[in-house]
Image: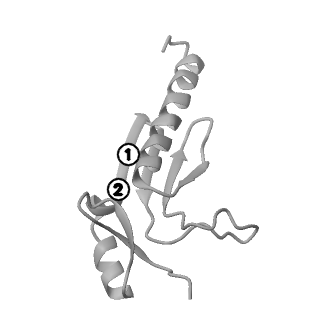
Amino acid sequence: MIPMHYILGGRSGRTPRVCPNLRAWKAFMDDPAQYKVDETDITLDVRVSTIFTGIDCSHTDMMVLSDAPILFETVVMGGPLNGHIFYAQTWDEAQACHDGVLHALIPELAAARGIEA
């Protein structure tokens, strides 16, 4: 059976582990500090949020994205990439994705407002 729920553990607290039961998963997910990788408000109406989902996102209705579990997502709310979701397998990949989205968005938003970034 394919594991459905994951929590973070290990020395860094950033290593995905299969969760033994739904109660433990829910307890873990009740504290955003445990699963929030990063969150950045670029402007009042543009936010980038990166989290550990605790659920394997590697299988969608349309295709298999990866054989390994995809447990992190970066979501853009507002701006030119509004609604885009980017996936990662590890905390470090998720942080790099978050930073990459910021790197791409900030100059574009600045140019749209006539500001040099």
SS at circle 2: strand
Name the residue type under label 2. Lys
Left or right of residue 94: residue 108: right
Give 33 or 64, whichever is nearer the viewer: 64
- Camera-side residue of 96 and 86: 96
Relative side of 94 to 10, left or right: right
Q: Quadrant of residue 20?
A: bottom left
Residue 113 is drawn in which quadrant?
top right
20 above or below 112?
below
Residue visible at 58% across and 24% down?
108
Q: Is residue 45 above or below residue 55?
A: above
Inter-mark Cα distance, 2 to 1: 8 Å
- Secondary structure at badge 1 equals strand
Image coordinates for residue 49, horizontal then vertical, percent: 44, 49
Crowdedness of circle 1 by 10 Å Cα count: few (<14), some, many (20+)?
Answer: some
Camera-side residue of 22 and 46: 22
Can residue 47 be seen here? The reply is no
Q: Is residue 5 in sight in this rendering?
A: yes
Q: Which numbered dot is residue 39? A: 1
Q: Residue at x 27, y 65 (%)?
A: 10
Q: Which residue is mark 2?
A: 36
In terms of image quadrants, where is residue 22? bottom left
Q: Are marks 2 and 1 in contact (CB under 8 Å)?
A: yes
The amino acid type found where label 1 is placed reads: Glu
- Up the image or down, 89 lies above or below 59; here it is above
Instruction: Give residue 116's position: percent from left, percent from top.
Output: 50, 10
* Callout 2 crowding tier (Cα within 10 Å): few <14, some 14–19, many ≥20: some
